[in-house]
Amino acid sequence: MASPRSQRPQSVAEWTVGELRALIADGEYPPGTRLSEEEVGKQIGVSRNTLREAFRLLAHERLLVQMHNKGVFVRTLDEADVEDLFRVRRMVELAAVRDLPADPARLARVAAAVAEADVAEAQGDWRALGSANLHFHQAIAGLSGSPRVDELMERVTAELRLAFHAMEDPLAFHKAYVERNRQILALLRDAKPEAVEAAVGEYLATAEKEILDAYRTATPPAGGQG
Amino acid sequence: MASPRSQRPQSVAEWTVGELRALIADGEYPPGTRLSEEEVGKQIGVSRNTLREAFRLLAHERLLVQMHNKGVFVRTLDEADVEDLFRVRRMVELAAVRDLPADPARLARVAAAVAEADVAEAQGDWRALGSANLHFHQAIAGLSGSPRVDELMERVTAELRLAFHAMEDPLAFHKAYVERNRQILALLRDAKPEAVEAAVGEYLATAEKEILDAYRTATPPAGGQG
DNA sequence: ATGTGGGGATCGTCCTACAATCCAGCGTCG
DNA sequence: CGACGCTGGATTGTAGGACGATCCCCACAT
């Protein structure tokens, strides 16, 4: 029944978490959607118990919000959320590039993300392009070599993806950053920490502004859920 | 039945999470302990379903580890964990004091933590003293004014607490940092960012070294748990 | 000493049950 | 005609039972 997007689920509950995460990221369940336990359970083929375990986890990751006796909803980010997410990104990404590791092999993941973006751009797939860009920045954060930072960044990007759905022209939005990321990679290869830090900082400022502008332009859907 | 350490549980599952967190932090369930679903469920008075929701959450927070078909165990930190935790602390705490907010009112929480430590030290309660010290550093991180950083730091300190149980003389260990924290508070009040950053950095280096030394001295309990 | 095969215990998952709560629709009353 | 309040249906929150799968311990045989 469920799509074969999964890996090798060690447990049904874990698999369910991944499945839901993917469904949310892909916009199958857009922000604001109410996820009925019975319905979703039937749809992806797990019991209510297992599903509730997954819901609780994803709520903890801020991808869902649980409203007592009313159900769980896909999270809708507000401006404060976006600002906070970028605050965290600044902290994480700038710290990562500030103390650059001597090991250039670590740049492989960064380079891979750039290549991924090229493919996605060629295909005009904005969702894949957005993912590629996020992967790029996960790789940047990954330069710190910290498992916990990696996990944090994964959560941050997952949340940020929720904001993408608010963009008017996602393809154009994401396209603008491909070149920028390529330049950052070049600076990383040249081992110029200050230049990298400046470039990443500038990137983050621009992206934040652009997303916030989109938020302020769009009619606030009013449906308060927090 | 369960102790009145809880707050205002919006749901039993949530309350259970808090309860377990407290039991682990207090050393009631020391690292390595196996938590039987049936046993714990009976003990704190929740059904197995609810308990499993809580377990899954705490495993996600790295306070527990779930081993397939073998049960959940209280996490045991290894050296790499401690190093990573301090890596994150450096990133978070140094970033927080680097961009100091002009608002001195934010220092209230920091000051409160110092006072808390004084009380705990006077009473010779090492657990309370350890908590106070952690609260101090949560307050430091809180200077960033980011909800997500706050949450991250809460998780980091919860994990770090697991390491405290490995210390030989916890009271002496924690005592050493009270004065240090008081000095940091003074520097914060004087609004001397560089000095604060240096002091916090030095603090972290010392604490990390001390904990790691304790780990290397203690006989490695060998019980690998994933 | 080593290998093998139960047997018991626990986990993982699903299912059912039921009180608590919310929501929509409807009727009553001002 | 609009506001209020009630009832009924639907959904959540939690408990509890069922059952296969898996692991661990131990007796037993080689």
Image: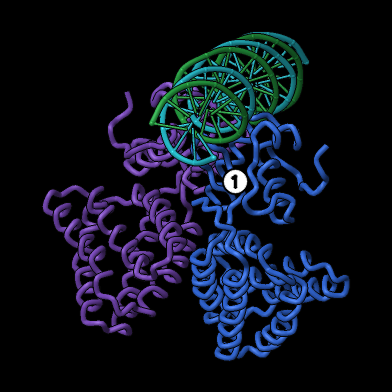
Chain colours: A blue, B purple, C green, D cyan
Toward the viewer: D6 or A152? D6
The part of the image, by quadrant, that contains residue D11 is: top right
Residue most toward the right? Answer: A123
Measuring from the top left, give residue A124's x and y in whole percent: 85, 71
Q: Is residue A30 left or right of residue B201?
A: right
User: How many marks are shown on the rendered structure?
Assistant: 1
At 70% from the left and 74% from the top, the residue drawn is A110
Q: Chain of mark 1?
A: A
The vertical placement of B129 against B48, above or below, is below
Looking at the picture, does residue A91 appear above or below residue C28? below
Q: Nearer the viewer, residue A87 or C19?
A: C19
Give the residue pinned by disc 1: A73
Image point (34%, 78%), residue name: B100
Q: Position of residue A61 (x, y in %)?
A: 55, 52
Mark 1 lies on a secondary structure that is: strand
| Residue located at (60% from left, 46% from top) | A73
Q: Is residue B36 visible?
A: no
Quarter of the image containing the N terminus of chain A? top right
Three-letter residue code for mark 1: Phe
Front in this rendered view, residue B176 or D13: D13
Residue A100, image x and y in percent?
57, 80
Classify 10 Å Cα crowding around label 1: few (below 14), some (14-19), many (20 and above).
Answer: many
As drawn, D26 above or below A86: above
The answer, for residue B206, to whether it is visible in the render is: yes
